[in-house]
Image: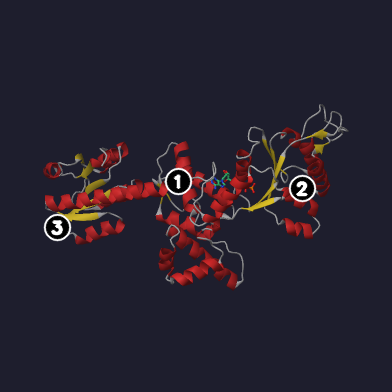
Amino acid sequence: MTDESKKLLVVEDDPGLQTQLKWCFDDYEVIIAGDREAALAELRKHPFPVMTLDLGLPPDDGGTSEGFATLEQVLNDYPETKVIVVTGNNERENALRAVGLGAYDFFYKPIDSDLLGFIVNRAYRLHELEEENTRLHTRRPESPLEGVLTGSEEMMEVCRTVEKVAPADVSVLVLGDSGTGKELMARSLHGLSRRNDGPFIAINCAAIPENLLESELFGYEKGAFTGAVKTTPGKIETAHGGTLFLDEVGDLPMPLQAKLLRFLQERTIERVGGRKEIPVDVRVLCATHKDLQQLIRDDDFREDLYYRISEISIRIPPLRERVGDVLLLARAFLERFSEQHGNKIKSFSKDAIAALEGYHWPGNVRELENRVKRAVIMAEGKQISARDLELGGDNANDAQSFDLREIREQAERQAILRAMNHSGGKISQAAELLGVSRPTMYDLLKKYGLKT
Ligand SMILES: Nc1ncnc2c1ncn2[C@@H]1O[C@H](COP(=O)(O)OP(=O)(O)OP(=O)(O)O)[C@@H](O)[C@H]1O
């Protein structure tokens, strides 16, 4: 036990009991508070793993209203503190109500120091175990690639592919929904390649108007068009010796697809308004959330370009399909943002965890990152609630389909993922949570394409 965890807060207004309680716990550093304000002032100063709380506090020493108000405030603001409620001999109802609200245990007066000592020691032990548990949960798994956090087998496979492919100078097409981490993977590919001393230049083909995209990519000569006051190299040239990342390549207009293809075949570019062929040495990585095969069928994407940019394809699974990743990433983001904001929020409430597990994350990791960032700023208690994350109610359940079978399957899939997340990927525990046998659980995982 650390020195800090040996502290015990005793909230008691009766001077006689204060003294008795003080020598009852000579193993602990006992701090006495006579009322709610004094107790909260102590809790603000340092964390207390355990506190005892007399329910009959002033100004309502004859009743319990002040005691209950103190209890609720402590449970809300200091959820890690175990509260042992001390109450009159025939006040069973109050004792049960306190435990119902979240008090750890209760104790009847007059004080039996052996029994109270036993309850306090047990509360300390439980607090210690819970802390250990939180530490284990927040421990990061070995990050396979710099900046990439994951514990899921699907993503580990993606990372292994990235490691293998990075040193080979091949073109890579990264596929995946918006916010899944395509750019992060492209940066890893660059970082692990022999070009990592060179530049990494990213351009989002969907974010730049069509008429500017050509000069943005290929550069222009002075006087090529109105406003071209000086010769300017494009992104491709700027990436010389390094990597060019074309995000949302599915949005590249047809004429530029032809020009890009020419560049990939000849490895030279011509600036807009120029005549000179400029040799450029870059590795091209592309990404898209669109279905390029469909675009090819619709004549919106050139098949020959597709083969050039996809010597290797890597598909990043959506966040909802990664077993265990939602909570792992949420905890990592919480740690990062609460450190950045200098506040002490360390955990998610139970309802927040259920909401995180139940939501289907259409915006993937980016959405999770944004929700946690916002919650850290908005949260008023010591824990992040589902409300702080703006999850719950209608937000969490936006299935728009009317197809009953589809809705049932979605719900089943969600439940399986929640159970797998909850059990840390342990199939037998997840099966138990869902009330199905292990073989059925394997069948379900297979049916929904969930790897373990
Ligand atoms: N596995 C991960 N671990 C840590 N952070 C991640 C992970 N995946 C994504 N992120 C973070 O999520 C955010 C979105 O990632 P990124 O921009 O790479 O996604 P994207 O798929 O390229 O998105 P878009 O399709 O919208 O361009 C970034 O802030 C990124 O750092």
Residue at left offset 80%, top offset 41% = 263
Q: Does mark 2 have its CB less than 8 Å from ligand 1?
A: no
* 41 and 372: which is toward the camera: 372
**SS at mark 3 in the image:** loop
Quadrant hosting residue 404: bottom right
Q: Position of residue 108 (x, y in %)?
A: 16, 55
CA distance for labels 1 and 2: 38 Å
Is residue 367 toward the left or the right of residue 57 in the image? right
> Within 10 Å of the Cα at label 3, are there few (<14), some (14-19), or many (20+) other Cα atoms?
few
Residue 388 is at least partly visible in this image: no
Numbered tag placed on residue 252 in the rendering: 2
Q: In this orientation, does residue 51 appear?
A: yes
Residue displayed at 33% across by 47% down? 131
Q: Tell me the quarter of the picture where residue 96 sits.
A: bottom left
Residue 355: horizontal and vertical position, in percent?
47, 57
Disc sitting over residue 140 in the figure? 1
Q: Earlier in the sequence, mark 3 or mark 2?
A: 3
Near-viewer residue (95 or 224): 224
Percent coordinates x, y for residue 101 in the rendering: 30, 56
Is 84 positioned to the left or the right of 197 in the image? Answer: left
Question: Would you name the residue on which mark 3 appears?
Answer: 89
- Which residue is rendered at x = 26% and y = 43% of the image? 36
